[in-house]
Image: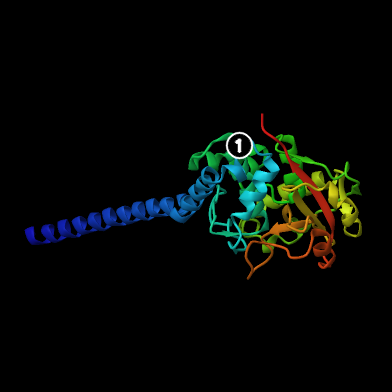
Amino acid sequence: MKTSFNKAKGIVHRAKRRTFYTKLYALCSMLCAVAVNAQIYSENDVEVCNSKFSFAVENPDLVGTEKPIGDVLAEVGKSFIGTEYIAHGIEKDGEEQLVINLTGLDCTTFLENALVFSRLIKKEKTSFDDYQDELTFIRYRDGEIDQYPSRLHYFSDWIYNNQQKGIIKDVTKEIGGQPISFNLNFMSTHAEAYKHLKENPEFIPIIEEQEKEISSRTYFFIPKEKISSVEDKIHNGDLIAFTTNVKGLDIGHVGIAVKGEDGRIHLLHAPQVGSKVHITEAPLSEYVMSVKKHSGIIVLRVLEQN
């Protein structure tokens, strides 16, 4: 009887021990998952960030605080020349959070980061926390992260919201632009191509409402055939958004206007997979004419900060 009792006691003890280790394993797995999800940047990203601030200190004649912000932005943008193009570099699993990838850029993240660093340099804010705050402010609607739809996915919406924040001014109309309206539906009708929409279909109606709101606005653009006639009105460091003839989309590409040694405006951009950040050999007007899907440009001027 005593032997049977001891066996039963041993079975219970082993069962409790298995339960304990099961719970411990689950806890460790959860903590590891949190650690992985929290790792939204690497040490390399921190190093690149610090290098941009060091660049400003070492080159006050190029990016000093007294320089016009457009000129600062152009020089900061040039410091990214040679950086690899990486598609979907900020798309990560889990809840929406600020993702930083400074070692590989697409056209939008290149433009955003050049803008962020130029603003921080002008404000003499040079910590990694400052960088994260500024990038959040620019990348998200009203500067607040609230799940995937809060990111400014359509660049025309990025333009609208960052004008409201006082960061940029759309100067397209005043330099000769003509009205354009967008009929947006690409994200909602191609949800399977977007990781977070595929995994969270409840976001699709929210995106649809955003598309309707953006489509109700009137924007202005310079048709590609007329860009050469307004080139002298485009400033060094202006942001350039390329309108597209792809159905359901608004903007197909973005970059930074830079004045070349030939006195012409060229494009500084992260062009496509397999390429690196560079300045176009051809002037902007000729570059646009060479790309069939580009229908024209929107010109944005970065505003000085008070």
26 vs 206, left or right, is left
Residue occupying the far bottom of the picture: 274
| Vertical placement of residue 89 versus 145, above or below | below
Quarter of the image where the N terminus is located: bottom left
Q: Position of residue 211 (x, y in %)?
A: 78, 49
Q: Residue at x 62, y 63 (%)?
A: 87
Given residues 11 and 279, the one toward you in this image is 279
Which residue carries the number 1 mark? 65
Q: Residues within 10 Å of mark 1 (few under 14, many from 20)?
A: some
Name the outermost residue toward the left. Answer: 2
- Where residue 63 sits, quadrant-wise, is top right
Number of numbered discs: 1
Left or right position of 259 against 20: right
Residue 278: x percent and y percent? 66, 62
Q: Is residue 262 above or below residue 219?
A: below
Amino acid type at mark 1: Thr
283 to the left or right of 37: right
Q: Secondary structure at mark 1?
A: loop
x and y percentages locating residue 50 in the rendered image: 48, 47
Quarter in which the C terminus is drawn: top right
